[in-house]
Image (cartoon, helix red, strand yellow):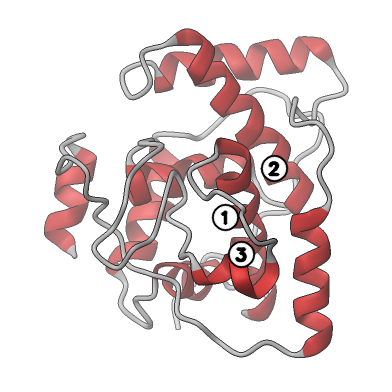
Amino acid sequence: MMARGCLLTLGIVLPGIALAGAQIYEPLAVEIRAGLQASIADRPAPQHAFTDSEAAVNWLTEMSQRLEKRIPDFDSRVECLRTVHFEAIRAGLDPQLVLALIQVESNFRKYAVSRSGARGYMQVMPFWVGLIGRQGDNLFSLRNNLRYGCVILKFYIDSEKGNLFRALARYNGTGGKPEYPNLVIGAWRSVWRYQGRLTFAPASPAVRSG
């Protein structure tokens, strides 16, 4: 796990393989499953969640500069950032946290696949499509992947009563091991921290272990 963190910190990845764990299938209560299905099915246009154009331009400009080495193509980079921001805010998550998770999970590789079969930017396990999605949903689609990933992460945070450390461990399927949560939280605080004004910023979950 720690070796994986060192590789990702250096921007080194194995071609075609995502160095990630896997969400674990858990039976869901009927009402929880219905709520998650509704969140996945709702499909408004993925632009961004800013109502202030100046704030949007400032955020997109700064994040684009940070992401340039990982996604060199400008149009693809901006599309990714717009969709991250939209889906994160829609799910009630900090966009910076989602960017940190993507960095650790796939290093922003759209077609990344882990050894356990997790797919795409946010390394979503295929069983989620059958559990809360719609048949034929493509997890390599930018919009699908980020929507599933954000909805799943928010589900884990809510299930853990706001404990981000435990929620991240569940997202990656690593249980109580600290390496993965520490990597994501470290990237959130150092690489993706944003000092500018956000039109809407969700309340940050508690960062604590145990």
**Is residue 45 shown left or right of residue 73?**
right
Packing grade of label 3 (10 A; few <14, some 14-19, many >=20) is many
Spot occupied by residue 15 in the image (x, y as percentages of width and height): 16, 40
Cα–Cα span, label 2 and label 3: 12 Å
Work out which residue is located at the far right of the displayed protein and give it.
51
| Whether residue 60 can be seen here | yes
Which element is circle 1 on? helix
Q: Which residue is mark 1?
A: 149
Spot occupied by residue 53 in the image (x, y as percentages of width and height): 81, 12
Q: Which residue is mark 2?
A: 87
The three-letter amino acid code for the residue at tag 1 is Gly
Quadrant including the N terminus: bottom left
Q: Are marks 1 and 3 in contact (CB under 8 Å)?
A: yes
Sequence-first disc among 2 and 3: 2
Say above or below: 114 vs 34: above
| Whether residue 162 can be seen here | no
Packing grade of label 2 (10 A; few <14, some 14-19, many >=20) is many
**Is residue 64 shown left or right of residue 161?**
left
Which element is circle 3 on? helix
Q: Are marks 2 and 3 in contact (CB under 8 Å)?
A: no
The mark found on residue 152 in the picture is: 3
